[in-house]
């Protein structure tokens, strides 16, 4: 019974243009029935919950899956998310993976890490979890987003602050080993091409940044240079269409070395890195 309903729901979601219809139909079935996806076959016909069709209807309207279930998965974390906070994406996991490798290669006993524009806290919490002796600091501007960040960071050792990423952490100037950010980077001119899940549900503050999408990244370049110690590293996520553009912001004239772009799991340019030049 339930698997037949899931097949029907999959078709409905596919017809609505949902990018991953079977995954979402199964996730929502598991959510409504309180089981894991792998246990869906064990739900008896008599236990079918008609609320399933209510959540399928919401997903048909392109409400994000994570808003319906209230949770998002990121690396080894389960995060609480909902209206007002950017839903973390799988592409960002490879950004964090690179950052973790970079910090470990530094061979610093207690590396200092700053996450600018932390949103749900996904990046900061992943780094705190996977780099055990790190000192992780994170900043978020939006009060709406911070309601979720605080829930996710409850009991963690991340130093969370509210403020503007461009003017944050003056107490750490010149002391940080790694600065990382997944900032807003969508050009305002691309608004109509953004997936409905992001355009209609993610906060605009987390999506758009000027005509070419690079306004905030230009500002974060100066913030990162201020925060990092010589030899420290910056990691900035960007749109796959901005490959090649972002490394040019981190020039030798501005005090950087080894600026480069890196691909995500789909082999699309996804993030730029640079090292603060030694004096």
Image (spheres, rainbow, N blue to C red):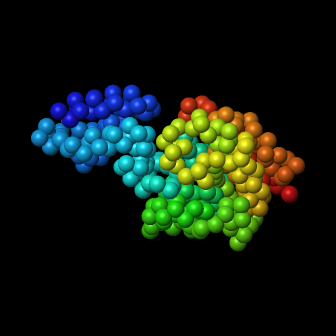
Q: Nearer the viewer, residue 61 or 9?
A: 61
Please state, as top left, top right, bottom left or bottom right, where the C terminus lies in the image.
Answer: bottom right
Residue furthest out toward the bottom: 171
Decide if residue 102 is in sight here.
no
Question: Where in the figure is residue 220, as x and y percent of width and height?
Answer: 72, 55
From the viewer's perspective, tell me whether residue 20 is left or right of residue 234: left
Position of residue 9 measured from the top left corner of the image (x, y, whole percent): 30, 33
Residue 14, visible in the rendered structure: yes
| Residue 74 position within the rendered picture, expressed as x and y whole percent measured from the top left | 47, 48
Left or right of 189, for residue 61: left
Choose top left, top right, bottom left or bottom right for residue 158: bottom right
Q: Quadrant of the N terminus?
A: top left
Q: Residue at x 88, y 49 (%)?
A: 253
Q: Is residue 42 above or below residue 132?
A: above
Q: Residue at x 18, y 41 (%)?
A: 48
Indicate the position of residue 145 as horizontal and vertical percent values.
52, 60
Instruction: Name the side, left or right, on which 263 lies relative to 18.
Output: right
Q: Quadrant of residue 192?
A: top right
Residue that lies at the very extreme toward the right in this rendered image: 253
Between residue 39 and residue 11, name the one nearer to us. Answer: 11
Residue depicted at 68% across the width and 48% down the height: 209
């Amino acid at each position: 019974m339930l698997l037949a309903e899931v097949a029907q729901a999959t078709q409905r979601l596919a017809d609505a243009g949902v990018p991953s219809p079977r995954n979402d139909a199964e996730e929502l079935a598991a959510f409504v029935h309180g089981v894991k996806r792998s246990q869906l076959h064990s739900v008896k016909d008599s236990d079918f919950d008609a609320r399933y069709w209510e959540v399928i209807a919401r997903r048909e309207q392109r409400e994000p899956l994570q808003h319906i279930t209230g949770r998002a998965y990121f690396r080894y974390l389960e995060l609480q998310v909902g209206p007002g906070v950017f839903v973390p994406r799988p592409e960002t996991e490879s950004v964090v993976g690179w950052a973790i490798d970079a910090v470990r290669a530094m061979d610093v006993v207690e590396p200092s890490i700053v996450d600018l524009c932390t949103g749900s806290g996904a990046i900061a919490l992943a780094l705190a979890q996977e780099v055990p002796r790190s000192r992780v600091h994170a900043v978020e501007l939006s009060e709406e987003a911070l309601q979720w960040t605080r829930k996710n960071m409850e009991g963690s050792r991340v130093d969370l602050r509210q403020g503007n990423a461009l003017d944050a952490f003056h107490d750490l100037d010149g002391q940080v080993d790694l600065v990382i950010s997944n900032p807003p980077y969508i050009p305002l001119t691309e608004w109509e091409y953004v997936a409905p899940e992001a355009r209609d549900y993610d906060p605009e503050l987390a999506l758009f940044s000027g005509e070419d999408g690079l306004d905030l990244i230009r500002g974060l370049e100066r913030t990162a240079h201020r925060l990092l110690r010589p030899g420290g590293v910056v990691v900035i996520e960007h749109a796959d269409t901005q490959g090649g553009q972002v490394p040019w912001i981190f020039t030798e004239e501005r005090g950087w070395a080894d600026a480069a772009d890196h691909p995500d799991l789909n082999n699309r340019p996804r993030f730029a890195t640079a090292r603060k030049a030694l004096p």
